[in-house]
Amino acid sequence: MKVLMLNGSANTNGTTFTALAEIGKTLEQEGIGYEIFQMGGAPVRDCIGCGQCSEKGCVFAEDKVNEFVAKAKEADGFVFGTPVYYAHPSGRVLSFLDRVFYSSGRSFAFKPGASVAVARRGGTSSSLEVLDKYFGISQMPVAGSTYWNMVYGKKGEEAVLDLEGMQTMRNLARNMAWMLKCFAAGKEKGIALPCAERENRTNFIR
């Protein structure tokens, strides 16, 4: 089993990475593999709702969206990490995830997800609320922790000083590992996934 984590920061080794790495270390202790996918600092195109998605993902292939989609299809769980700038997730990570889910949302169904927000001081709660909405619309169970999934620090070396934040990351990882093992046990017992109805799509504005 493997958890795919998205570092939504342009800083590949900053506070967001530090939080995700703490999760990854604990996942490995629980026998679960992980990968931290680095968005990096390259530009990310917005989703324009063109409807030209394919099995490979988004029709616009000049960035890393489709690379992430390919990995997501093989992953068993997800963690999306973001820095906080103006009391919301980074605009780049939202553009990235909008295209990922618009083109390939069904690849995430019934796989547990969690979001992590990192900030110098404020805006983490509102950022988590935004990221968590991707899970709700995609039939994804949400892994929680013993506090909101937030870590404080302007730099990576400051993040490790947030002892409760690091503790929250470790507990999140343990909860994610437990969920993955439970789902695997259910699959072995032949418990079928829910069958979703999709026939009705009501448009009230005509």
Image (spheres, grey):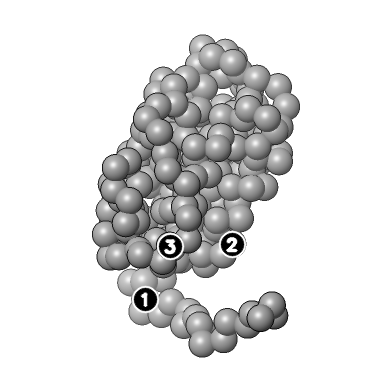
In-front residue for pair 61/160: 61
Check whether the beta carbons of the residues at disc 3 and disc 2 lie within 8 A of each other.
no
Q: Earlier in the sequence, mark 1 or mark 2?
A: 2
Residue tagged 1: 189
- Disc 2 marks a residue whose amino acid type is Gly
Q: Which secondary structure lies at badge 3?
A: loop
Estimate the spatial distance between the alpha carbons at disc 1 and disc 2, rounded to whole Å.
26 Å
Q: CA distance from mark 3 to mark 1?
A: 41 Å
Q: Does the residue at mark 1 contact the one at mark 2 (Cβ under 8 Å)?
A: no
Residue 185: x and y in percent read: 38, 66
Residue 157 in view (yes/no)? yes
**Residue indicated by mark 3:** 50
Per the model, the C-alpha gap separating discs 3 and 2 is 23 Å
Reading the image, the residue beneath label 2 is 136
Residue 100 in percent (x, y) is at: 41, 53
Relative vertical location of residue 48 with respect to residue 122 in this rendering, above or below: below
Left or right: 67, with 106 as reference point:
left
Closer to us: 154 or 158? 154
- Residue at screen point 43% across, 62% down: 50
> Which quadrant of the view contains residue 7?
top left
Could you say which quadrant of the image residue 120 lies in?
A: top right
User: Is 71 situated above or below 170?
Assistant: below
Mark 1 neighbour class, 10 Å CA radius: few under 14, some 14 to 19, many 20 or more: few
Q: Amino acid at mark 1?
A: Lys
Q: Position of residue 64 (x, y in %)?
A: 32, 42
Q: Does any portion of residue 33 appear in the rendered image?
A: no
Residue at the (70%, 22%) spot, across then down: 121
Which mark is first along the chain, 1 or 3?
Answer: 3
